[in-house]
Amino acid sequence: MRIKNLVAVAAIAALGLVAAACGDDSDDSSDVEVADNPTFAAGTTMERLANAGTINIGTKIDQPGFGMNNLDGKPEGFDVEISKIIAGKLGISPDKINWVETQSAVREEYIEQGKVDFITATYTINDKRKERVDFAGPYYEAGQSLMVRKGDDSIKGPEAFRAGDKTVCSVTGSTPAENIKQYLANEASQLVLFDTYDKCRDALQNEQVDAVTTDNVILLGYISKAEDAFQLAGDTFTTEPYGVGLKKGDTEFRNFINDVLEEAAESGAYEEAWKNTAGKFDSNTPELPQIDRY
């Protein structure tokens, strides 16, 4: 298999693509309303954060349209804008947000250890994760898809992996990595895992793997930056509800975030956040999914 020496090749490629991994220097942010001296019930997470005037938010920095560092080293994307809206309702301006890179494999751990106050990081809500953390939302529903090299029509969907002769790359601890396993003839030889999707993209470009799998809008972001290099293969084959991850049992904070999400949809802030970020790759502006107030 072509997986041999993959880690070394991807690492070398990553060094040559630092600028690409950081995104561009365009302004993908929208104006965010910041509440003036909001008050909250004593002892709540909202009161603690409002009084502190700062907040730690976990997000991705390698996913175009949702969470990716620009040339100034600041994250931008739809997840980032949703985070800013939530922080703004706490009276916290964007410049007082401490962004914490949160890779898929450590999201629950970072929440449990208090390294972040909440996470918006293309974080699919599922029952297994809800055993350790709570979720507000969902605020967006994606669908898993496949990205291949431009002109490769040998893969038209996940069924192509059943023969066992093609490899696919995803991220350790991610929902897409788990979902694709059911289509693989030999997981050990066909599934390549990294800590970021940038490394999967580089491996695909260098012909070390045959496909990358994650959610469709993230792959569209990569394609928009390299239309001559990549293309989608087939339709989406899952539904992925993205939620805001927070400490388990913090019902007051979860309710607060759910209220903020619904207010953002009503005010137009949600739509504006999409158009300024992921909407540049997907012009079909989504509606806020029905909030699950479990």
Image: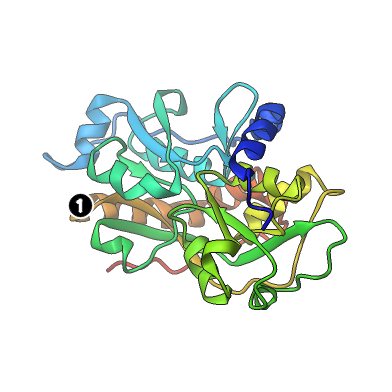
Q: Position of residue 244 (x, y in %)?
A: 39, 52
Name the quadrant containing residue 152: bottom right
Image quadrant occupied by the N terminus: bottom right
Image quadrant occupied by the C terminus: bottom left
Q: Residue at x 75, y 45 (%)?
A: 206
- Residue 287 seen in this snapshot: no
**In the rendered view, does 224 fall on the left or right side of 122?**
right
Q: Residue at x 36, y 45 (%)?
A: 106
Tell how many labels: 1
Q: Name the colour scheme.
A: rainbow
Task: Examine the rendered structure and indicate whether residue 108 appears above or below residue 7.
Answer: below
Q: Position of residue 233 (x, y in %)?
A: 75, 67
Q: Position of residue 193 (x, y in %)?
A: 53, 52
In this view, the residue in front, 294 or 242, is: 242
- Residue 249 seen in this snapshot: yes
Q: Position of residue 119 (x, y in %)?
A: 38, 45
In this view, the residue in front, 277 or 104, is: 104
- Residue count near mark 1 (Cα–Cα under 10 Å), binned few <14, some 14–19, many ≥20: some
Task: Examine the rendered structure and indicate whether residue 177 appears above or below residue 158.
Answer: above
In this view, the residue in front, 141 or 224, is: 224
Q: Residue at x 59, y 52 (%)?
A: 271
According to the picture, the residue beneath numbered tag 1 turns out to be: 250
Amino acid type at image mark 1: Asp
Residue, far left: 43
Question: Element under label 1?
Answer: loop
**In the rendered view, does 33 fall on the left or right side of 234?**
left
